[in-house]
Amino acid sequence: AQSVTQLDSQVPVFEEAPVELRCNYSSSVSVYLFWYVQYPNQGLQLLLKYLSGSTLVKGINGFEAEFNKSQTSFHLRKPSVHISDTAEYFCAVSGLMGGKLIFGQGTELSVKP
Amino acid sequence: GAVVSQHPSWVICKSGTSVKIECRSLDFQATTMFWYRQFPKQSLMLMATSNEGSKATYEQGVEKDKFLINHASLTLSTLTVTSAHPEDSSFYICSATRTSDHLTSYEQYFGPGTRLTVT
């Protein structure tokens, strides 16, 4: 069985500051890892994904994440956030055959001016 | 490409009535579609997985007779909430995986969601 833990439910940060949203996962098999963003009353948009290869993954909107197998982590980072980055962020895993996505609890990023 | 739509985007219904939500893949064929439910300030919970032409697979605790899922074509899946009650009020989101490329079959494309309010 797989599980995902997002360590922070809320992250307040000032505009132009760096941010890290933490995600740890648990799985007995290899997984694919994803970060999604959800704006209020909208569906999910894929920010980035890790499938294989380089452990540093770059996504849209200036976000990046690093896969750390030994620490079973996939933390999301952005060097300088904007007001428009205010949203809910979800980390998710799936097995290598695809199918079911297991989501973390979500992290609410609030960017203040 | 890979756009998923949902209709309606929001719906209000009276307790005891049934509501149908449509999920369509607009520019690709979707072998598999997923239905999620999301309560305010909470994560997405998978309700069921539907494959075109076969019965949906429901997650534990989800009432299959209450949440009827039909995946009649490669571009359309429907979720019908039967005899809706106020506790069914939620945000329902569907997603789909693309048939054309098995190498990307793991990736889910999400619809914009449907807000259901039962009064």
Image (cartoon, rainbow, N blue to C red):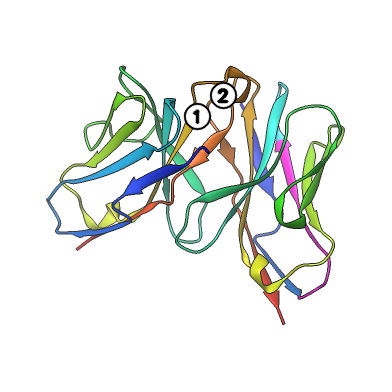
**As drawn, is A92 to the left or to the right of B37?**
right
Picture quadrant where residue B61 is located = top left
Measured as percent of width and height from the top left, residue A110 is found at: 66, 71
| Residue found farthest to the bottom | A113
Type of amino acid at the residue the image marks with label 2: Ser
- Residue A16 lies in the magenta-colored region: yes
Question: In the rendered image, which quarter contains the N terminus of chain A?
Answer: top right
What amino acid type is highlighted by mark number 1?
Thr
Asked which quadrant contains residue A38, the reply is: bottom right
Q: Work out whether A110 lies above or below A77.
A: below
**Residue lying at 50% horizontally and 61% vertically, measured from the top left:** B41
Question: Which numbered disc flags the more N-terminal residue, 1 or 2?
Answer: 1
Residue A98 lies within the magenta run: no
Query: Residue A11: which disc?
Result: none
Residue A77: horizontal and vertical position, in percent? 80, 55
User: Residue at position x 59%, y 27% from top?
Assistant: B106
Image mark 1: chain: B
**Residue bearing the label numbered 1:** B97
Residue corresponding to mark 2: B105
In the rendered image, residues at marks 1 and 2 fall on the same chain:
yes
- Which of B73 and B92 lies nearest the eye of the viewer? B73
**Mark 1 to mark 2 CA distance (whole Å):** 6 Å
Q: Secondary structure at mark 2?
A: loop
Bounds of the magenta segment: A15-25
Left or right of B25 on screen, residue A80: right
Element type where label 1 sits in the image: strand
* Residue in the picture at 53% in, 49% down: A44
Q: Mark 2, chain letter?
A: B
Residue B20: which quarter of the image?
top left
Q: Is residue B96 above or below residue B91?
A: above
The answer to whether mark 1 and mark 2 are in CB contact below 8 A is yes
